[in-house]
Image: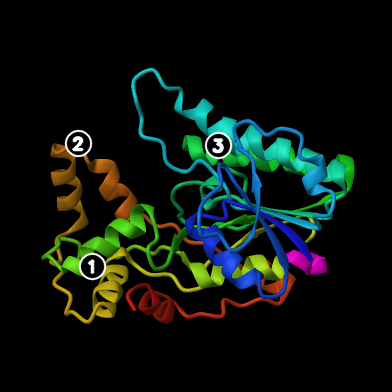
């Protein structure tokens, strides 16, 4: 199968490329030519997509991993507008051109943030969306547009909403935790007994691979996780042990952490670390007969090999 993969040089895109190039012909979409690549290259910028009808003519499936994920807020910048330009407008331009070129399926990597930030009960794919932040809002607006394109053109759309994705050299919050785990400093995070769903990079890639051709994936929204929830304290403990060290986490009550963080203007950080965010993946498992192939313990171990 001929596949166009966006975000091919990113954390997720690199792993998807590594797995899929064995059985498929991959064209990687990048903003500018990079050295030492081992895939066919399409130069295009998600912020200003031009006519790609020729390049898309022989493509069977688009896997859209590219996104604007982190913006450092600066004075005078409309952050939501910046996210929308890439994640909403750019996505829908690409999808519309793909549909017009006859692409059969468009796989969109969204975010669990479309469902919300916290849970009192696990999120499901049937829940009313409740995006709270610019990144999640832009992704949700893209989802809406993709469904309209699917209805108008017949191109099949698959939406995947992952929670925090972890793996070796992961960026973002997991990368910060990995640095702490490697240093194994005494941390006051041993008393956080929340429940959070995560997804290992190998499991997410396996689901994407499944969705390329599975007949029941068409026009579905899938939530995904390792199907194993952990507390922040347990996550850090597992990470530190994977480095071969003994954890040293102080069991400070969450209320004390919130109070101290509030004094430092960092209350939101503790709120995120101590809140619940659980995902129910029953629909994904039942629809696709899919199970995460890599356990949480093994996934964490692979981060520190």
Residue at 42%, 81% (x, y): give it.
Answer: 298
Q: CA distance from mark 2 to mark 1?
A: 24 Å
Q: Dividing the picture into quarters, in which one does residue 301 lie?
A: bottom left
Residue 121: % across, % down: 50, 58
Measure the C-alpha gap from mark 1 to mark 3. 32 Å
Q: In this figure, which residue is indicated by the disc labeled 3?
A: 137
Q: Residue visible at 76% across and 40% down?
A: 52
- Report helix, strand or loop for mark 1: helix
Residue 165 pos. (x, y %) = 46, 61
Q: Is residue 65 above or below residue 15?
A: above
- The image position of residue 85, as x and y in percent, is 58, 30
Residue appearing at x 53%, y 26% in the figure: 81
Q: Pointers 3 and 2 in contact (CB under 8 A)?
A: no
Rounded to the nearest whole Å, what is the CA distance between mark 3 and mark 2? Answer: 25 Å
> 174 or 269: nearer the eye?
174
Image height check: is 134 above or below 1?
A: above
């Amino acid at each position: 199968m001929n596949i166009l993969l966006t975000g091919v040089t990113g954390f997720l895109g690199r792993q998807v490329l590594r797995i899929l190039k064995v059985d498929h012909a991959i064209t990687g979409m990048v903003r500018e030519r990079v050295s030492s690549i081992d895939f066919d290259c399409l130069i295009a910028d998600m912020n200003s997509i031009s006519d790609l009808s020729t390049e898309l003519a022989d493509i069977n499936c688009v896997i859209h991993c590219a996104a604007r994920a982190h913006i450092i807020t600066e004075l005078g910048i409309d952050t939501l507008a910046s996210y929308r330009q890439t994640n909403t407008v750019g996505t829908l331009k690409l999808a519309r051109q793909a549909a017009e070129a006859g692409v059969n399926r468009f796989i969109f990597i969204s975010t669990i943030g479309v469902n919300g930030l916290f849970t009192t009960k696990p999120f499901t794919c049937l829940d009313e969306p409740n995006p709270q932040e610019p990144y999640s809002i832009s992704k949700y607006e893209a989802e809406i547009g993709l469904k309209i394109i699917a209805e108008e053109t017949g191109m099949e759309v698959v939406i995947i909403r992952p929670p925090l994705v972890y793996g070796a050299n992961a960026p973002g919050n997991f990368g910060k935790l990995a640095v702490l785990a490697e240093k194994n400093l005494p941390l006051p995070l041993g008393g956080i007994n929340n429940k959070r769903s995560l997804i290992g990079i190998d499991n997410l890639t396996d689901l994407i691979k499944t969705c390329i051709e599975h007949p029941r994936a068409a026009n579905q929204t899938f939530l995904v996780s390792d199907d194993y929830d952990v507390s922040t304290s347990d996550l850090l403990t597992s990470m530190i042990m994977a480095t071969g060290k003994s954890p040293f986490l102080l069991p400070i009550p969450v209320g004390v952490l919130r109070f101290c963080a509030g004094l430092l203007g960092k209350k939101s950080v503790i709120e995120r670390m101590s809140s619940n965010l659980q995902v129910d993946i029953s629909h994904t498992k039942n629809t696709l007969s899919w199970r995460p192939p890599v356990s949480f313990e093994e996934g964490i171990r692979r981060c520190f090999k």
